Amino acid sequence: MTVALVLADEADAGLRGQLAALGVHQVGAAERTGPGLLTVAAAARAAGERVLVCDGDDAVPEEILVRLLRAGGTAAFTGLRAPAPRTALSCETPAARSGGGALVVDTPDLDALAGAAESLAAAPAAPAAPAAVGALLGELTRRGVTIQVLDAGPDGEGVVAHQIIDPAARDMAVWAAARTLGPAALYGISLGLGLLAALWFTDIATGAQVLAGVTLLSAFLFARAGAQLAAVGAGVRARPAVSWLGAAAGLLTEFAVYAALAVRSGLAVTSGTGNPAGLTGIFGGTLRNVHAASWEGAGPGGVWRLAAAAMLLLGVRWLAELCYEAAVRASAAIFAGSAKRLLGQVIALPAGERYAVIAVTALFFGPRLTFGVLLAWGAVATVYVLARQLASTGRQPLAKGELPAYRGDGVVPRRLGGVVHGMLPPLLPVLTGLLVTCMLAVLGLANLPGLLVLTPAVAMLPAALGARHPHNGRLDWLVPPLLLTGEGVYLAALGFSRLVPPPLVFALLAVVIVRHADLAYRARSGLGLPADAFGLGWDGRMLLAGLAAVLGILPAAYAVLAGYLWLLFGWEFLSAWLRSAGPSLPHRARPIAG
């Protein structure tokens, strides 16, 4: 049985009925201010059974309440969503919007809950709901309580994360909190381990491959610990810079591993292993006569093409999930509860499953099969996730005005969009341009002479007319990932067909994906740019690449553009992102004693 306390002036009848139907036999209300936390403390000492504390402003989804009440031990749902957009009249850093947060405290942790509530109530500025739920989470973590956070980042999906990594990550988060290590430190360690794993993946020795796989999973462990700590840390979790650091660390780790595996395929050829490029694993030689041995070309260049395709597919899926979240104001995560839901997470190929695929297939069969599995499974996952999202979009109200900042437009689309005053729906022009681009990429851009090589870039330009549309259509959240798809397909096809060194094509495509992700996270954090002037926008980069091909200087243009965008990525993190983290939120995490 469970006792529930609702942080509101009065628990409404609907919420009482919902909780009673779930087996909560006693529902009370606590004030929103400091005295309400004393009520929580008193209830924790007197209950003798599990206590549910939830925010009364926004209803917690029934699915989440069921999972919380069925969870073994102490569990929480933070309910945090993207921060509110910053208005032109305000210079303040936006705070995270909170949905219905809830916390279930198991019986052995009730004394810690009482102490945490009393400590927060005695603080000079006691938090009010919904901040009280987050403050309780942070205080319980500092007291050594292990908390399962249901919405601590999408990378928590899947069997690998949910069943293997996250239990250890929660203990690591408690260890880190006791030593005043923040999420940023754990994300930094994760990135360092990821780059170290990438370095070992370039070695064809079996021992190095085992070490690389273990190091990669260790990087994921630290990343999950950072996400857990960010979710329960008061104040820190809402800082845009910390959120983007965690996302960027994950992307850079995976991209570096992809590049390392492609490099390994070339080193294996020069070392004379006798196997086709990319089939360097323990059993790689058994696949020499199958179609996988020559997919996209039998040489190292074919492996680089597969790596670029896998990376682009990952980036498009990643951006689509962010845009869906912005459109419906809800997470795209499939919260695991039943075996069926956990299976759905596995089909969606989350980060834990991807890392496991890389570690296992790279060791036993080599990079070529690794990328083949990632592409095949990723395609199935994309169809599955998009089908779920499209089915649910029609049942939820759509947000207005935020998605245009996710597009990554340059200066030209902003001006062209003003010509039609935002009246042109954005999806159809994007689909038309993408169709032309993909068809020409399949036929081969090497066959297009002179100015005709600019055809895909010109075909995508009508999409610029929808730049100022509010993107409030049922499917308009697909526009930013489709723009990334068009740009990525064009840059990759153009580079590979015009004999640009494959590592250079990969580097440019990687930084373009990171640029789109950077802009999307800014928009998600209320810091969106109206036009990507410094990054040239998707339109500027496509036109620049096309003109360079016409002039015959494509390799040099790719090198300069990739180098410039990577420098811009580092500079803007040190300037724009860290500056946004300077003004803090009302309730900072207090120093951890001991």
Image: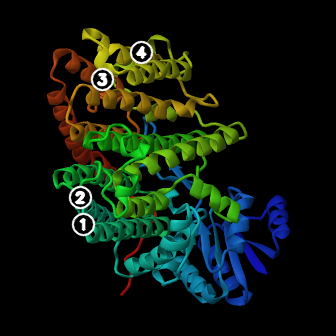
Residue type at numbered disc 1: Ala
**Sequence-first disc among 2 and 3:** 2
Horizontally, residue 162 falls left or right of residue 25, namely left
Relative image position of residue 445 (x, y in whole percent)? 32, 20
Q: Which residue does the image show at 45% across and 39% down from the upper left? A: 316
If the image is split into quadrants, where does the N terminus sit?
A: bottom right
The residue to which callout 4 is attached is 459
Q: Which residue does the image show at 31% across and 49% down from the upper left? A: 577
* Label 3: few (<14), some (14–19) or many (≥20) C-alpha neighbours in 10 Å: some
Quarter of the image holding residue 43? bottom right
The residue to which callout 3 is attached is 540
Measure how far apart labels 3 and 4 are at the Cα level: 13 Å
Residue type at numbered disc 2: Thr
Relative image position of residue 481 (x, y in whole percent)? 47, 35
Res 205 label = 1
Measure how far apart labels 2 and 1 are at the Cα level: 9 Å
Q: Is residue 242 above or below residue 326?
A: below
The residue to which callout 2 is attached is 202
